[in-house]
Image (cartoon, rainbow, N blue to C red):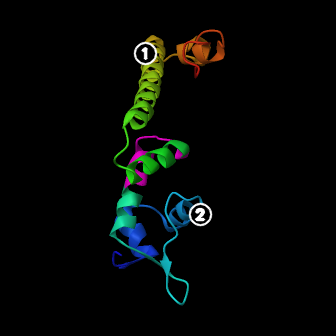
Amino acid sequence: MAELDYSIGEAAKLSGIKIPTIRYYEEIGLLAAVARSEGNRRFYGADDLRRLAFIRHARELGFPMDEIRTLLKLQDDPDQSCATADAIATARLQDVERRIARLERLRSELRKMVEQCAAGRVGECRVIETLADSTHTHGRLADE
């Protein structure tokens, strides 16, 4: 068994994950229940820190918790096929690409609004006019 060298505060500092979040991950089973002292203090080992780093990185990449749970199960059984991990990553990539496309359309629309603004009176302001026209961007910029 690995040495349990880290308090929850140290684990939080080293992993970049806040203490309440670490407790939450333990509560929902993403992190196995850790050893506790006689005073009920949690202690973490290097394996726990690696798991926390995995979770943090997956969250930074935008994976939802259910997919992180699946990826952790796959990591725990390295001899199985990686088809599920590939499918999860592919779906995440497609989602990111859709979001990027929406953001590019949004950037284009905002640029047009700014470029067309005469910096004159509000009654002639293209920014205000465009924002007031709910049919102008309907369907093009909305979440799909």
- Is residue 5 on the magenta stretch? no
Q: Quadrant of the N terminus?
A: bottom left
Residue 102 drawn above or below residue 60:
above
- Is residue 64 on the magenta stretch? yes
Position in image of residue 32 (x %, y %): 50, 65
Q: Is residue 16 left or right of residue 127?
A: left
In which quadrant of the rendered view does residue 85 lie?
A: top left
Say few, some or many: other residues with alpha carbon within 10 Å of mark 1 (under 14 / 14 to 19 / 20 or more).
few
Position in image of residue 81 (x %, y %): 37, 38
Distance between the alpha carbons at the discs numbered 1 and 2: 44 Å
Q: Given the image, on which type of amino acid does mark 1 rest? A: Ser
Front residue of this view, candidates 5 and 2: 2
Front residue of this view, candidates 62 and 88: 88
Residue in view at x 50 percent, y 68 percent:
19
Position in image of residue 45 (x %, y %): 37, 72
Position in image of residue 101 (x %, y %): 43, 19
Q: Is residue 131 left or right of residue 51?
A: right
Q: Nearer the viewer, mark 1 or mark 2?
A: 2
Mark 2 element type: helix
Q: Which residue is mark 1?
A: 108
Tag 1 near tag 2, CB within 8 Å:
no
In which quadrant of the rendered view does residue 50 lie?
A: bottom left
Magenta: main secondary structure equals helix
- The magenta segment is 54-65
Front residue of this view, candidates 129 and 11: 11
Name the mark on residue 27: 2
Residue in view at x 44 percent, y 61 percent:
17
Residue in view at x 34 percent, y 78 percent:
3
Going from N to C along the chain, the mark reached first, 1 or 2, is 2
Q: Given the image, on which type of amino acid does mark 2 rest? A: Glu
Mark 1 element type: helix
